[in-house]
Image (tube, rainbow, N blue to C red):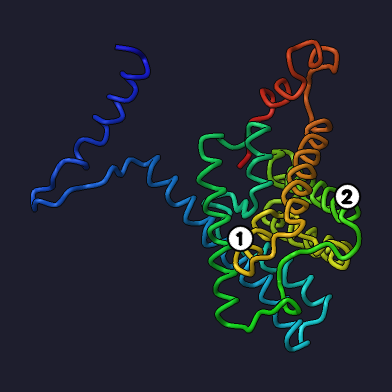
Amino acid sequence: MTKSNKSRDNDIEACADVVAPSPRGQSGVCSSPEVVALIQKVVAELIGTYFLIFTGCGSVVVDKIYGSVSFPGVSVVWGLIVMVMIYSVGHISGAHLNPAVTVTFAIFRRFPFKQVPLYLAAQILGSILASATLCLLFNVTKESYFGTVPVGSVVQSLVIEIIISFLLMFVISGVATDNRSSWQIGELAGIAVGMTITLNVLIAGPVSGASMNPARSIGPAVMVHIYKNLWVYIVGPLVGTILGGFAYNLIRFTDKPLRELTKTTSFLESISRNNHPAI
C-alpha cells in the first residue's frame, strides 16, 4: 500500500465513528476539528464578504439613486465595513474578504494553498449574493450601477488599481503578518486596514472605482451583466497585492545577511522560513 493510500485510510478511520450510523439510525458527518474549523472559516468569509459588498456597494446605490451619501461618505462606508468585518470574523478566518489577498497570502506561504479554492468560492459567492440582494431592493439601472468601470482610460484604471492594491497589501502585511508589530498595533490593525481602504477610495474612486478586490467587481458584474473591462479589476488587484506582499517581505526583519539569503534557491523561500505566519 502506498503512503497516500495509508493516509487516506487513516482519514477514513478517523471519521469512522461519526460516519457510521448513530444509535438512532441516523447517519453522521465527519466532524474532525480540522474539518469543522475549515467550514467555519469558509462560512465566515462568505458572510463577511456578503456584508462588505452589501454595505459598500449599497452606499454607492443609495448615493446614485437618492444622492444622500456623497462621495466622501461612500469612502468612509467602505473603510468602516472593512474594519467592522475584520473585528467580527478576523479571529475566525483571517478576514481576507478578497481573492487577491488570499492568493497573495498563499504565494508567500502564509495561507495553505489547498484552502484557496474554498476561500475564493466563498468570497465570490458572498459578493454575488449581496449584489443580488441590492438588485432586489433597488431599481438598479446603468445609471445606478454599483460595480466598477473605468472612468478614464483602461490603462489609467489598471495602473491605479495596481498601486492602491499594492498599498493595501503592504499595510496588511505590516499589521497582520509581522510579529514585531503586534505589540505596537495589536487591536488597531483593523483600523489601519480600514483607513487604508478609505484613503484608496478617496484617491482612486473617481478614476477606476477603487476596487482593490476582484470579488467586489465580479459580483455586481454577474448580476447586472456588465462585463466590459472586468479583467482590469481582476488583474490589477492581483498584480498589486502580490507586489505589495513581495515588497514587505523584502524589508521584513531577518537576522541572516543578504548574501546568505540570495545564495539559496529562492530569496522569498528563505524569508518565509524565517518568518512564520502570524495569522
Report x, y in % for residue 20: 16, 41
Report x, y in % for residue 145: 71, 74
Q: Is residue 63 visible?
A: yes
Q: Earlier in the sequence, mark 2 or mark 1?
A: 1
Q: Quadrant of residue 226?
A: bottom right
The reply to whether the C-beta atoms of the residues labelled 2 and 1 are less than 8 Å apart is no
Q: Is residue 98 left or right of residue 210?
A: left
Amino acid under disc 2: Val
- Label 1 SS: helix
Q: Is residue 57 left or right of residue 129?
A: right
On the rendered image, what quadrant is the N terminus found in? top left
Amino acid under disc 1: Tyr
Report x, y in % for residue 110: 63, 35
Picture layout, residue 226 above or below residue 144: above
Name the residue carrying label 2: 159
Report x, y in % for residue 185: 74, 51
Which residue is painted at 69% across and 26% down in the image? 272
Name the residue carrying label 1: 87
Q: Is residue 32 left or right of residue 120?
A: left
On the rendered image, what quadrant is the C terminus found in? top right
Which residue is painted at 70% across and 82% down in the image? 62
Which residue is painted at 84% across and 66% down in the image? 205
Residue situated in front as seen by the camera: 31 or 179: 31
Picture layout, residue 213 above or below residue 273: below
